[in-house]
């Protein structure tokens, strides 16, 4: 089968499409025929060996997919050949087939096609839990989303507006700002050209109630300085590359709450919250919530697709369609 292989850590352009043996379903595992797989920023970091966890080469890239069950291993219950499923894995998704533990899969919800399903889980669960479980957002509040035109960012705009919050989308270019307005952002800030702190204060009057930060770098402190008293600041990621050092007096003076969110370990740490979140997210999907997919590429174009994400040239989600 064809698979996108990382044989040398580095830029996405180093990825190669190779023929490798098909996976086999071990005990507790399921083989999925991958129809679509989406690019998440951590895929870029893993290929570059800049992720929190180092993956030795060679490996197949890709962490999120949707497709059809092709084989079921011993001890697997509740899944049958032909079922439409979506799932996440620590590598292996940019390929025609993947073997994963059955627990990594869930049914494709009604209302999402395979491309949308492949683009849904990571960003929407991140958006939902960072806004609600960790950000305690309520209707009418001002929510600032950094990197708002990206995968996590666009999902945050979607979920926050559906929860009745007022979104301020912070992005690098006017074109990206327009994309965020099209998705429902009430206000936008082009942080490349405008002072983030001053503009947040100007728009909100009293400051932001919640900041969702998947970007890091120098924007984090600027956004925190514009948070209202009692505001919540949720650390989601560091797409800019730099992990900021925050003066803690800002937290004291603002009575603010600073929380970190990590999807990888959420189900282990807060299983009941994840269960409740699953049904809340399902309700939003039934009401029409779906990811903003801006580009679909074939498997051979996966290196280019990852490079475009790494270079901030895409909005929303980029999907690899393995059938192309
Ligand atoms: N904590 C978690 O559980 C979790 C889950 C998923 C993702 N994440 C993290 O969240 C971040 C966003 O992920 P994503 O999949 O949404 O990525 P993405 O689609 O590439 O979006 C990232 C956004 O960050 C902005 N950005 C600012 N400086 C950047 C730089 N130097 N390089 C690249 N982008 C830059 C870009 O928007 P502008 O050009 O408009 O600034 C871009 O749209 C990543 O750091 C990822 O690791 C964390």
Image (tube, grey):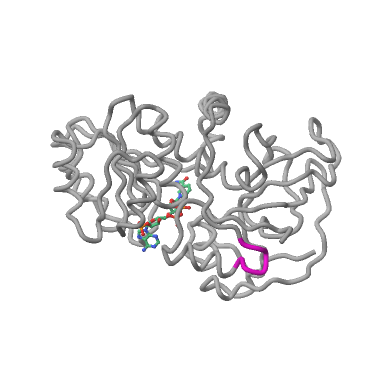
Front residue of 207/242: it is: 207
Give me the residue at 56% from left, 35% from top. 268
The quadrant of the rendering that contains the N terminus is bottom right
Tell me the quadrant of ligand 1. bottom left
Give me the residue at 61% from left, 50% from top. 64
| Main SS category, magenta section | helix
Q: Is residue 242 above or below residue 224?
A: below
Give me the residue at 28% from left, 42% from top. 168
Q: Is residue 160 above or below residue 90?
A: above
Front residue of 21/144: it is: 144
State the image coordinates of residue 166 (x, y, percent, origin top left). 30, 33
The quadrant of the rendering that contains the C terminus is bottom right
Residue 134 within the magenta-colored segment of the rendering: no
Q: Quadrant of residue 182?
A: top left
State the image coordinates of residue 175 (x, y, percent, origin top left). 35, 57
Q: Is residue 51 above or below residue 178?
A: below
State the extent of the magenta-drawn residues as a range.
Answer: 297-302
Give me the residue at 67% from left, 64% from top. 299
């Amino acid at each position: 089968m064809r698979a996108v292989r990382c044989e040398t850590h580095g830029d996405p352009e180093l990825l190669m499409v190779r023929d490798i043996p098909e996976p086999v379903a071990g005990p507790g595992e399921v083989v999925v025929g991958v129809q679509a797989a989406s690019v998440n920023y951590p895929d870029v970091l893993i290929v570059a060996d800049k992720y929190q966890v180092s993956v030795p080469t060679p490996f197949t890239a890709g962490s999120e997919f949707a497709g059809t069950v092709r084989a079921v291993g011993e001890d697997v219950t509740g899944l049958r050949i032909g079922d439409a499923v979506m799932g996440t894995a620590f590598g292996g998704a940019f390929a025609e087939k993947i073997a994963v533990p059955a627990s990594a899969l869930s049914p494709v919800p009604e209302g999402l096609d395979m491309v949308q399903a492949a683009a849904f889980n990571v960003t929407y669960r991140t958006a939902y839990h960072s806004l609600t479980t960790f950000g305690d957002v309520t209707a009418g509040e001002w929510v600032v989303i950094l990197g708002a035109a990206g995968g996590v960012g666009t999902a945050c705009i979607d979920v926050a507006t559906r929860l009745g919050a007022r979104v301020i989308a912070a992005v690098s270019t006017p074109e990206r700002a327009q994309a965020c307005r099209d998705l429902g952002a009430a206000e936008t800030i082009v942080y490349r050209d405008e002072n983030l702190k001053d503009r947040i204060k100007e728009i909100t009057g009293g400051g932001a109630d919640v900041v969702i930060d998947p970007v890091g770098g120098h924007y984090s402190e600027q956004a925190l300085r514009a948070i209202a008293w009692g505001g919540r600041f949720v650390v989601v990621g560091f797409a800019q590359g730099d992990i900021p050092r925050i003066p803690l007096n800002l937290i004291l003076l603002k009575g603010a709450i600073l929380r970190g969110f990590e999807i990888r370990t959420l189900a282990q740490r807060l299983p009941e919250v994840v269960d409740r979140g699953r049904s809340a997210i399902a309700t939003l999907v039934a009401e029409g919530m779906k990811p903003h997919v801006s580009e679909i590429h074939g498997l051979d174009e996966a290196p280019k697709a990852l490079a475009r994400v790494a270079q901030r040239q895409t909005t929303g989600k980029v999907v690899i369609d393995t059938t192309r």
